[in-house]
Amino acid sequence: MLYHLLYPFHTTVTFFNVFRYITFRTIYASLTAFLICFFIGPWAIKKLREMQIGQYIREEGPANHHRKAGTPTMGGLLMIFSIVVSALLWMNLTNFYTWILIFVTLAYGIIGFVDDYLMQIKKRSKGLSARGKLMLQIVPASLVGILLYVYADFNTHVTIPVFKNISPDLGWGYIFFAAFVIVAASNAVNLTDGLDGLASGPVVVAGVTYMIFAYAAGHVKIANYLQISYVSGAGEAAIFCGILAGAGLGFLWFNTYPAQVFMGDVGSLSLGAAIGTVAVITKQEIMLILVGGLFVIEALSVIFQVGFFKMTNGRRIFKMAPLHHHFELKGWPEPKVIVRFWIIAIALALISISTLKIR
């Protein structure tokens, strides 16, 4: 909105020329998202507490988590609000990818809201059924895949990191691939969101990392120099990534240990889906395995635990899954688990960025 309102005046007031630069808008979009979360956060937490929207703690969870029962949850609503407002203010509203990213954030936010509503307000301990939640997630993800497939300038090749000459074309099968990436990312972040700030921190890291990828993919000269896929208009996704990082930092102010508020599924599902969508838009889908390596590890720990449990009639690989609970039960203090997982996320992000020069 600001871009459309102020940039046209650059011919008379040269200062307004800065609004055409993605770097400028990224910085101030991220700051906007941060400040919205930071200043509205206390009010939002107070309202959630007044509405008695408190975290439900499952009986089978670690014993020390029961003290968190009643902590305000569904704080992801604050993040979504800050993300959408910042996007509308600073992004190019004529850009196709702007609306794709806003749509995904809102669609998955609604799914998460319904799940949280059933669990926290209606006191249904499991919220939506696992199958029901998955089916609801597949619908918007598939729609995104279809929209990208029919979009004239979007190619259906899949970039394989490091190997510049290997880029298989999936054709119409890309619709299913894109949907899988988005749904998988959404659920991986959701599984990681089990400790104070454990998901918020890596979301910020992933946002900053994909901000770099998006800027490179949307700049024809940089894309050609780095030998990565050029995606016309993808530069706007860099602004969105900056917004994700800013909102994540703003929310982390209140979500850090000991948490004053939890994001709930309304936050984790929407943030994960947004990151997955950016990965698709920037043609860095496979790279998400490394950028979001922490999320992947957490998700795999659950898959392996459940599979091994069924195959061996009750034996376990970990003391508890997701993986962060395993280390808690081994005696690690919660802050130690959180910070060490953040360190892993940062290290994986740095390795991911380095691949831009490895071809």
Image (cartoon, rainbow, N blue to C red):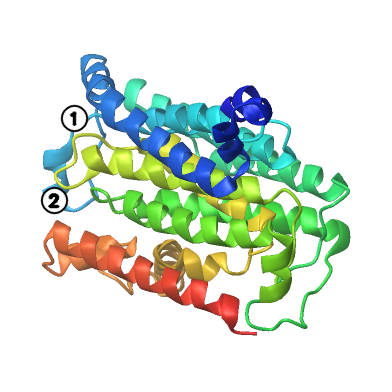
Residue 92, compared with residue 210, is above or below; it is above
Residue type, mark 2 in image = Ala
Q: How far across and down, in percent of the image, does residue 183 sit?
A: 59, 50
Disc 2: which residue: 63
Left or right relative to 277: residue 168: right
* Residues under numbered marks 2 and 1 in contact, where contact means CB atoms less than 8 Å apart: no
Residue 7 tag number: none
Q: Quadrant of residue 268?
A: top left
Left or right relative to 359: residue 50: left
Q: Spatial distance from mark 2 to mark 1, Cα to Cα?
A: 15 Å
SS state under label 1: loop
Disc 1: which residue: 70
Q: Nearer the viewer, residue 202 or 38?
A: 38
Residue 274, compared with residue 176, is above or below; it is above
Q: How far across and down, in percent of the image, does residue 197 sit?
A: 27, 49
Q: How many marks?
A: 2
Q: How far across and down, in percent of the image, does residue 39 sit?
A: 27, 26
Q: Nearer the viewer, residue 21 or 204?
A: 21
Residue 156 visible at all: yes
Quarter of the image with the N terminus is: top right
Q: Nearer the viewer, residue 215 or 45?
A: 215
Q: Residues within 10 Å of mark 2 (few under 14, many from 20)?
A: few
What residue is drawn where x is 11% and y is 40%? 67
What residue is drawn where x is 21% and y is 67%? 327
Left or right relative to 302: residue 168: right
- Mark 2 or 1: in front is 1
Q: Residues within 10 Å of mark 1 (few under 14, many from 20)?
A: some
Residue type, mark 1 in image = Gly
Q: Quadrant of residue 330?
A: bottom left
SS state under label 2: helix
